[in-house]
Image (tube, coloured by chain):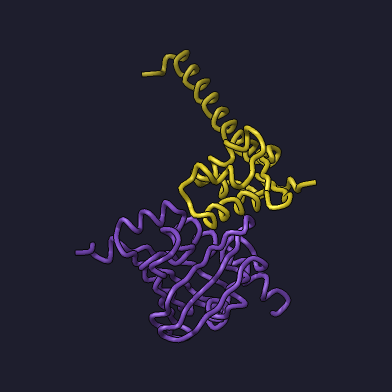
Amino acid sequence: MPNYQVNLDDAFRALADPTRRAVLQRLSQGSASVKELAEPFDMALPSFMQHLRVLEDSGLVSSEKKGRTRTCDIQPAALLPVEDWIAEQRAIWERRFDRLDEYLKELNASGEAP
Amino acid sequence: MSAAPDTRRLRMTRYYDAPRDLVWEVWTNPQHLAAWWGPFGPDATSSTIDARVGGEFLVSMQAPDGSEHPSRGVIKAIDPPEKIVIEGDANAGDACGAGLPPGATVTISFEAEGNGTRLTLTTVFASVEALHAADASGYTASWSQTLDALGAYFVSITEGVS
């Protein structure tokens, strides 16, 4: 079983690069070999492997070697802590705006609004 | 006429919680180099260093598909434990030269800072175009990742020592 324990720092670091995000987008459509994943990028193989390593270290991607082919998969569960963190921030701001809304309505009703 | 060095220069720096002599050692000892350089791990990486001016600096990486990716250069200056200057092999296979871009001068400097070491990797590329090509080939992102991995390597080799 892959380890789904994801460190938020590692996950955001993994997401903070256009090549790595493109790899995740590709993997969300299904498994792919390292060769297939590297193909769209005009990048040296060691450089591309560095990106894959960051993705694997973050837990967002897992890989399995069969013979000479390494096949990669996305680990969608690993994105959950990232989603939770963003949802939490959004909720805080939504509650703030709701309170502001109510406050403005009260002001309006009491005739104190300009 | 080539562009001014400033526009061809790329500078990266890291602080390591490790003494300068040790940081110098892992940069110039082939056994250490093979352990932290690049993405393929120590089993797929080897190194030979002729540690003198004019000597060869080589780290060879073998990708899982069997392809070879050498980081090859000539040592232009070596001043233990402060500075090593390497010129990337002009015949490198791609624009990033697996870490030592063709015709680029890569200077690694080691400064004592507090209880640790400030490492600065400065690359002066052959041209502005060469800088952009190396960056597109993954040069900056790869060194960034490798310098981070070096930090983790210091943690792994000093664990249990202090």
> Which residue is found at the position 54% from the left and 41% from the top?
A21
In the image, is residue B77 above or below residue B125?
below
Q: Quadrant of residue B52?
A: bottom left
> Which residue is found at the position 54% from the left and 57% from the top?
A46
Q: Tell whether B107 sits left or right of B29.
A: left
Q: Quadrant of the C terminus of chain A?
A: top left
- Residue B115 seen in the figure: no
Residue farthest toward the left in the current orientation of the protein: B1
- Pick whichever, A102 or B20, lies toward us: B20
Residue farthest toward the right in the current orientation of the protein: A1
- Looking at the colours in the rendered structure, which chain would you say is drawn in yellow? A
- Residue A97 seen in the figure: yes
Q: Position of residue A96 (x, y in %)?
A: 54, 29
Q: Position of residue A103 (x, y in %)?
A: 50, 22
Q: Tell whether A43 sits left or right of A58.
A: left
Q: Tell whether B60 sits left or right of B119.
A: right
- Pick whichever, B37 or B153, lies toward us: B37
> Which residue is found at the position 59% from the left and 40% from the top?
A24
> Which residue is found at the position 58% from the left and 59% from the top?
B67
Q: Quadrant of residue A72?
A: top right
Q: Position of residue B121 (x, y in %)?
A: 43, 69
> Looking at the image, how many numbered discs can be counted on the residues?
0
In the image, is residue A56 above or below residue B82?
above
Q: Tell whether A21 sits left or right of A4.
A: left
Give the colour of chain B. Answer: purple
Q: Position of residue B16 (x, y in %)?
A: 54, 71
